[in-house]
Image (cartoon, rainbow, N blue to C red):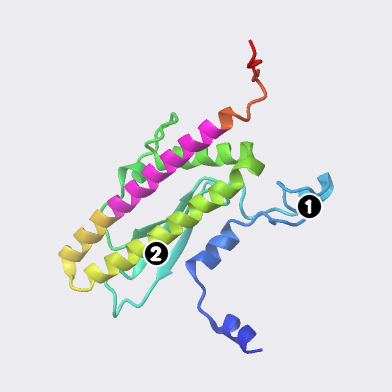
């Protein structure tokens, strides 16, 4: 009972919300990516869908104790396969990779980067999903450390100095996520070349 009471009274974490946002009835017969029959897999509309162009989690901490209290976690691409990226709301600029939307595919754009990642992961779901979940977990852990680091530095700042600092940190966060995701995407593409059916194994004796 005490364990259940602790669960019921604990605060809702960002990861809890992410879990819901990324849901596609995982590991049930209603999972569109699962092994249920055609009817069951299409019975209910999952939260995490291709049409989910973006999702957001708004986190507000104690503003009386923390000048960097507001954090907006922004997610592009299918939520199940892509991370939510934390940005401090007390800022005056948005990273170019998020503020600009090229009409043609460009991996310097966060939108296109995460759309590409989602497509590649889903195309080989069984082979890629574990690597993808580990990639998202690693980024979440990095984000927690980064936010704690920024909180500590921001404690002694206020006004324009604080806003300038948080804006700079947002750019650094975007760069880290973009660079990490591009590296991961290239890794998956390389792995995917070994999964192609258009291959021919040469006889080593020839």
- Determine whether, in the image, residue 64 is placed left or right of residue 33: left
Q: Nearer the viewer, mark 2 or mark 1?
A: 2
- Marks 2 and 1, the one that precedes in the sequence: 1
- Determine whether, in the image, residue 18 is placed left or right of residue 43: left
Measuring from the top left, give residue 95's x and y in whole percent: 31, 47
Viewer-proximal residue among 90 and 114: 114
Q: Is residue 176 magenta?
A: yes
Viewer-proximal residue among 199 and 11: 199
Measuring from the top left, give residue 50's x and y in whole percent: 60, 44
Image quadrant assignment for residue 126 = top right
Q: Which residue is mark 1?
A: 43
In which quadrant will I find the C terminus? top right
On the question of residue 52 being in view, the answer is no
On the question of residue 39 being in view, the answer is yes
Residue 39, compared with residue 206, is above or below; it is: below
Mark 1: secondary structure: loop
**Residue 144 marker:** 2
Q: Which residues are magenta?
A: 170-191
Question: Of helix, strand and loop, which mostly describes the magenta segment?
Answer: helix
Crowd band around label 1 with a 10 angstrom C-alpha radius: few (<14), some (14–19), many (20+): few
Residue at 55 percent of width and 67 percent of height = 16
Mark 2 vs mark 1, CA separation in Å? 37 Å
């Amino acid at each position: 009972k005490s364990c259940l009471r602790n669960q019921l009274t604990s605060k809702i974490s960002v990861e809890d919300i992410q879990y819901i946002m990324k849901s596609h009835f995982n590991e049930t017969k209603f999972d569109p990516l699962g092994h249920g029959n055609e009817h069951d897999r299409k019975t209910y509309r999952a939260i995490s869908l291709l049409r989910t162009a973006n999702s957001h989690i708004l986190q507000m901490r104690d503003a009386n104790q923390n000048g960097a209290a507001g954090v907006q976690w922004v997610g592009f691409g299918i939520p199940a396969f892509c991370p939510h990226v934390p940005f401090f709301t007390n800022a005056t600029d948005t990273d170019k990779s998020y503020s600009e939307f090229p009409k043609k595919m460009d991996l310097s754009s966060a939108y296109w980067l995460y759309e590409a990642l989602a497509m590649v992961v889903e195309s080989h779901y069984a082979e890629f999903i574990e690597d993808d979940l580990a990639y998202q977990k690693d980024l979440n852990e990095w984000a927690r450390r980064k936010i704690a680091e920024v909180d500590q530095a921001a404690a002694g700042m206020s006004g324009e100095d604080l806003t300038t600092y948080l804006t700079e940190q947002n750019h650094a966060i975007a760069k880290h996520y973009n660079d990490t995701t591009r590296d991961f995407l290239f890794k998956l593409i390389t792995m995917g070349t070994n999964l192609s059916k258009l291959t021919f194994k040469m006889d080593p004796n020839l």
